[in-house]
Image (tube, rainbow, N blue to C red):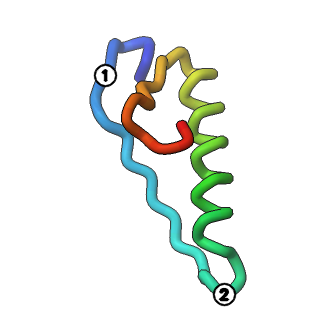
């Protein structure tokens, strides 16, 4: 998508059992992976205004 100039939103969903996978930890793991793949794809990710970004 980066090669085609896409600059819209990306939506990521994940369903886990909160008893087996603590929501905060899974959000942190997902955020780290999302940042990795988006920057690897050539995107600059805007994080202004997001806590702990």
Tag 1 secondary structure: loop
In this view of the protein, which residue sits in the foreground, 25 or 48? 48
Under circle 2, the secondary element is loop
Residue bearing the label numbered 1: 7
Give the number of callouts.
2
Depth check, front residue: 4 or 32: 32
Residue 13: x %, y % from top left: 45, 60
Q: State the residue lying farthest toward the right.
A: 20
For mark 2, what is the residue?
19
Image location (x, y in percent) of residue 26: 64, 62
Q: Give the side of residue 4 with respect to residue 13, left or right.
A: left
In space, the residues marked 1 and 2 are separated at their CA atoms by 36 Å
Mark 1 near mark 2, Cβ–Cβ under 8 Å? Answer: no
Residue 48: quadrant of the picture: top left
Residues packed near mark 2 inside 10 Å, few (<14), some (14 to 19) or many (20 plus): few
| Horizontal side, residue 35 vs residue 3: left or right | right
Q: Quadrant of residue 22?
A: bottom right
Of pointers 1 and 2, the one earlier in the residue sequence: 1
Relative to 13, residue 34 above or below: above
């Amino acid at each position: 998508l980066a090669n085609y100039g896409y600059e819209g939103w990306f939506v990521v969903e994940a369903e886990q059992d909160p008893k087996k996978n603590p929501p905060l930890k899974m959000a942190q793991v997902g955020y780290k992976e999302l940042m990795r793949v988006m920057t690897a794809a050539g995107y600059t990710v805007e994080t202004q205004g997001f806590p702990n970004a």
